[in-house]
Image (cartoon, coloured by chain):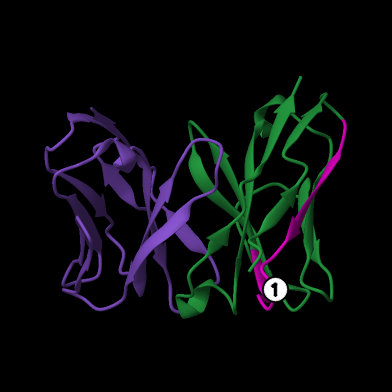
Amino acid sequence: TQLLEQSPQFLSIQEGENLTVYCNSSSVFSSLQWYRQEPGEGPVLLVTVVTGGEVKKLKRLTFQFGDARKDSSLHITAAQPGDTGLYLCAGGGDSSYKLIFGSGTRLLVRP
Amino acid sequence: KAGVTQTPRYLIKTRGQQVTLSCSPISGHRSVSWYQQTPGQGLQFLFEYFSETQRNKGNFPGRFSGRQFSNSRSEMNVSTLELGDSALYLCASSLDGQGSNQPQHFGDGTRLSIL
């Protein structure tokens, strides 16, 4: 059974601080997606990484896929209150038509 | 372009009843997936449909079922409701499915509460 573990589960930081969220598995995934979910809404895709070692940047967010395609990280620089939300990583397999979601990291950025 | 639409947004049922939830995918999307989200278990995959066929199923009891119509709209049904079925049910659509790493576009969910 493929599992994705996210850490930390909760993070409360001051505006302007940096943070990193981790997504780890013992299984290999063909791709890793990161989503952000706000209260009362569905998750919204932030990025997809597919190549081991790949790094993608989205403004102040930096995503990295591990060389072995078993782990990923999300780094936020100079966090803002608008970054508050639930961050979810999700792994996809080559042939199974389902996404495995991590347990999520709930981020609160205080002004 | 309209997003994924789920109806109803909120639903209150009692134990033993059954419920049907509806999902209209983004126009042109042929894959529809359903997920259950709870505080304790997070987002769990229920099933995925493509061209009216169920291609994959998660580890949920047979009380959970779904179907997809020729216009790609999908419904899921839960029979003999239990208290533990209280959750946010999310639908996601994509062009041709998760196996191809397509981005999933989620609706805002149906909040189901069982009394």
The residue indicated by pointer 1 is B27
Query: Residue at the right extreme?
Result: B17
The residue that appears at 74% across and 57% down in the rendered structure is B23
Residue A85 lies, in percent from the top left, at 37, 39
Which shade of the palette goes to chain A? purple
Closer to the camera, B100 or B28?
B28
* Rendered location of residue A64, percent (x, y): 19, 64
Relative to B87, residue A70 above or below? below
Left or right: B36 as drawn, with respect to B78: left
Decide: is A8 above or below B1.
above
Secondary structure of the residue carrying numbered label 1: loop
Can residue A74 be seen in the rendering of this structure?
yes
Q: Dividing the image into 4 quarters, which one contains the C terminus of chain A?
A: top left
Mark 1 closeness class: few <14, some 14–19, many ≥20 residues within 10 Å: some
Q: Where does the N terminus of chain A fall, quadrant-wise?
A: bottom left
Picture residue at 46% right of the left edge, 40% below the top: A38
Callout 1 amino acid: Ser
Residue B26 is one of the magenta-drawn residues: yes
Range shown magenta: B17-32
Place of residue B85 in the rendered image (x, y in percent of width and height, measured from the top left): 68, 34
**Chain the render paints green:** B
